[in-house]
Image (cartoon, rainbow, N blue to C red):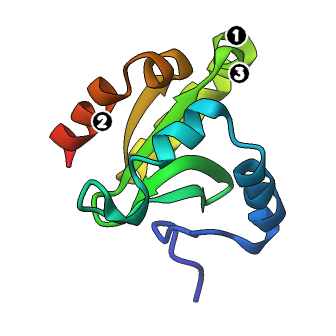
Amino acid sequence: MGKDPNMIIYNPPQLKNARKNLRINSTEAERKFWQHLKNKALGEKFYRQFGIEHFIVDFYCWRKKLIIEIDGNVHNEPEIAKQDRHRQVFLENKGFKILRFKNEEILQNIYRVIDEVRKFL
């Protein structure tokens, strides 16, 4: 009997150190955004630097299958943007919804971003 191809692997052990490093070295925008998500501040439980399959997503709400990504300038580079598109298609095909925001959006107008997340929730 083979492995179910539709089964999703969460927080695979081989990503544990990478996830921890990303939490320790989070950007200013990620830290600011987390302050508005943690402790069910929006009525839903969110995780940060969460492993889904072989990817690590910035923020994840289990009940809503919602992934939130905060993108810095590095995501404008063609190769990184290509990887982001591949990753997004993969995750959307697994049933996840993805919201993306730029660092500047978080740092300059956090409440507009929070309102967008609230609308989705």
Q: Position of residue 27 (x, y in %)?
A: 67, 34
Q: With respect to residue 9, does 74 lie above or below? A: above
Badge 1 crowding class, 10 Å Cα cut-off, few under 14, some 14 to 19, many 20 or more, is few
Tell me, yes or no, whether the two marked residues, 3 and 1, touch with CB atoms within 8 Å. Answer: yes
**Residue at mark 1:** 78
**Residue at mark 2:** 114
Earlier in the chain: of badge 2 and badge 3, it is: 3
Describe the element under mark 1 as helix, strand or loop: helix
Describe the element under mark 3 as helix, strand or loop: helix
Disc 3 residue type? Ile
**Residue at mark 3:** 80
Disc 1 residue type? Pro
Residue 65 vs residue 103: left or right? left
Residue 65 vs residue 108: left or right? left
**Quadrant into which the N terminus falls:** bottom right
Residue at the (52%, 38%) spot, across then down: 32
The one of 110 and 5 positioned closer to us in this rendering = 110
Badge 2 crowding class, 10 Å Cα cut-off, few under 14, some 14 to 19, many 20 or more, is some
Residue 29, numbered circle: none
The one of 39 and 72 positioned closer to us in this rendering = 39
Residue 91 vs residue 79: left or right? left
Disc 2 residue type? Ile
Residue at the (44%, 29%) spot, across then down: 100
Residue at the (23%, 61%) spot, across then down: 43
Q: With respect to residue 14, does 119 lie above or below? A: above
Q: CA distance from mark 2 to mark 1?
A: 28 Å
Describe the element under mark 2 as helix, strand or loop: helix
Total numbered circles: 3
